[in-house]
Image: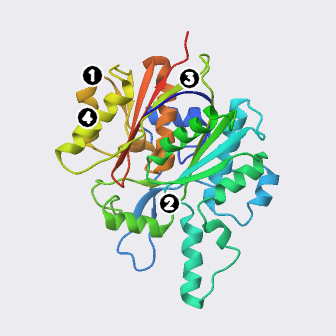
Amino acid sequence: MKNMGLSLLGAGCVTPLGRDWKTVWDRIRKNQPPEISTLQGPDCPAPVEVYKTPLPEVPERVATRLRRSAGISYFACAAAEDAVRNSGVLPGGRMALVYATSDGSVAYTRRFYKDVLARGTGSPLLFPETVYNAPASHIAAMLGLDGVVLTLVNDATVGLSALATAADLIFSGEADQCLVVAAEELDWITCEGYRRWGLTTPSGRSRRGAVLTEGAVALVVGPADPAHAQILHVHSGKLLSRGASRHRKIVQILGETTRGETPGVAVLSSSGPNHQEEYSVRECFSGIPTLVPKAVAGEAFAVSSLLQCLCGWESLEASGRAVIPVLGWSGQISCALLAAPEG
């Protein structure tokens, strides 16, 4: 577990609930989900319900660079630009970038390999956007970052791993601030994959699974400053097994992250009823309120974990401290603790 003491300096988001964070937060609190859309590929048995996010407007200089880019790069660049502007920090050589994703650019990847299978070759116009770090390169070019640029890939816990990596870069002296960005995009092929896995529910059936979504969240973090909200700890995480030991590990990680103190709110990672996560929180912190952002905003894996952090940040004025557990689909769990500014 990292004792981080990072300050939260600014944020940006691109979501199906909107791009203005205050509007997004208000809709999450009022339980106002976006309009349902569906995606269905050829030969797929049923459409899958999703929350689509419109491509955001970006400055002309950025739009020129992104003219052949996938939606995920538009989402990432827009959220990053908003976060840096809202932080008041000037980007430059001493600002690092840590980009996190779970699925990456699935639309262009599917199209590229479709061409390979059909013709034996793939389009060079599509290939650059198929790599996981394509959005990070666009962000760095857009903001003029020439320092450390990293891309992390994992399940939803990678959002918190990106924050831990940001702390390493800042406290090792390699950066003065760090821009942490997570982005995901929808495509029918991933929706169908998650449907077969059982994570989502086909359209028209009783809702049991997650509603997949897309977009981006970005945070600018810096060294601890009592005038700003802080990320106090990020747990290094554990791999969860099935059965009773899974519950015990969740309880253990919650206790280790909060160090015996009771936070004012828990921002859960479930996108629907996840009794194991909620029971574990109730066992550790009896009576505290809980927030479930994914129940309103949908499931976007890496993006959703940073969205949890944003919700925790907004709740600090009333709660003082917020605990952020993140359970990933690969069986991992991580956790973060946020604290309100001093005074």
The amino acid on which the numbered mark 3 sits, given as a three-letter code, is Ala
Which residue position is annotated with label 2? 103
Answer few, some or many: residues within 10 Å of disc 4's Cα (few below 14, many 20 plus, some between 14 and 19). Answer: many
Residue at the image point whose x is 71% and y is 55% from the top: 138
Q: Residues within 10 Å of mark 2 (few under 14, many from 20)?
A: some
Distance Cα–Cα, label 4 vs label 3? 26 Å
Rendered location of residue 302, percent (x, y): 49, 49
Q: Position of residue 293 (x, y in %)?
A: 43, 39
Q: Is residue 120 above or below residue 325?
A: below
Indicate the secondary structure of the residue bearing disc 2. loop
**Residue occupying the point 43% across, 50% down:** 299
Provide the residue designation for mark 4.
280
Q: 234 or 341: which is nearer to us? A: 234
Work out which quarter of the rendered image holds the C terminus and state it.
top right
Closer to us: 339 or 148:
148
Q: Relative to the observer, which residue lies in front, 146 or 308?
A: 146
Label 1: which secondary element: loop
Residue placed most toward the observer, 114 or 242 = 242
> Mark 3 sits on what residue?
229
Of the numbered discs 1 and 4, the one sitting upstream in the chain is 4
* Residue named by callout 1: 287
Quadrant the N terminus occupies:
top left
Amino acid under label 2? Asp
Give the Cα separation between the discs numbered 4 and 2: 28 Å
Q: Position of residue 55 (x, y in %)?
A: 64, 55
Give the SS element for disc 4: helix
